[in-house]
Image (cartoon, grey):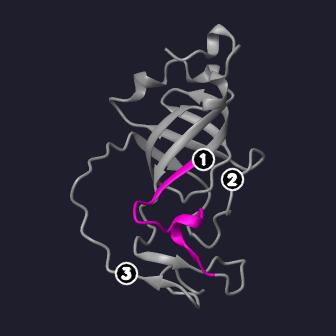
Amino acid sequence: MTTDTDLRPGEVAVDAPKPRDATLYFIGRIRTPWTSRLETPRQGSFEGPVCRLEIFEPWVPALQGIDAFSHLQVLYWLNRARRDLVQQSPRHHDGDTRGTFALRSPVRPNPIGVSTVRFVALEGSTVLVRGLDCLDETPLIDLKPDRCVFTPGAGEDNKQD
């Protein structure tokens, strides 16, 4: 593959319908060291580089208490991903074509990414984390504590309201 739009052997693209029924509020922007899909890691790592979740107004007050959690779920809009492939040939699977819904590829009809990240610090309206695998300036959809902290017997500080 030489560009983000080239098809690999076995891949199938379709004419996707025009979007018509959803509204998302981007609550911020993600800052990472990666500017090309080809250089972005396939999976994030808790030992990876520190990345920044820059939260926009009026959402900044929603960060109150986020620093009580060690791990967070980050949902983001993969704004530069193709949306038309129904079958894909993953980069590291020679000729192994699979349906899009059987892959974690960013190429999807609704390119929503989700990563579990390790919380590093809160600096004003910016959350520092490790474990992302998306391009620099990716739009941020949502941020929430990792669901694992709400297991029975968790301390009072980790209970959901």
Question: Where residue 87 appears, x then y in whole percent?
Answer: 52, 78
Please give left or right for residue 160 compared with residue 38 in the image: left
Q: CA distance from mark 3 to mark 1?
A: 27 Å
Query: Residue at left 57%, top 57%?
Result: 134
Query: Which label sits on residue 115?
Result: 1
Q: Secondary structure at mark 2?
A: loop
Q: Which residues are magenta?
A: 97-114
Q: Nearer the viewer, residue 52 or 102?
A: 102
Of the numbered discs in the image, which one, if any, rests on residue 44? 2
Place of residue 86 in the rendered image (x, y in percent of width and height, measured from the top left)? 46, 75
Asked if residue 105 shows in the view, the reply is no
Given the image, on which type of amino acid does mark 2 rest? Gly
Q: How many marks?
A: 3
Q: Residues within 10 Å of mark 2 (few under 14, many from 20)?
A: some
- Residue at which label 3 appears: 14
Q: Secondary structure at mark 3?
A: loop
The image shows residue 94, relative to residue 36, as above or below, that is: below
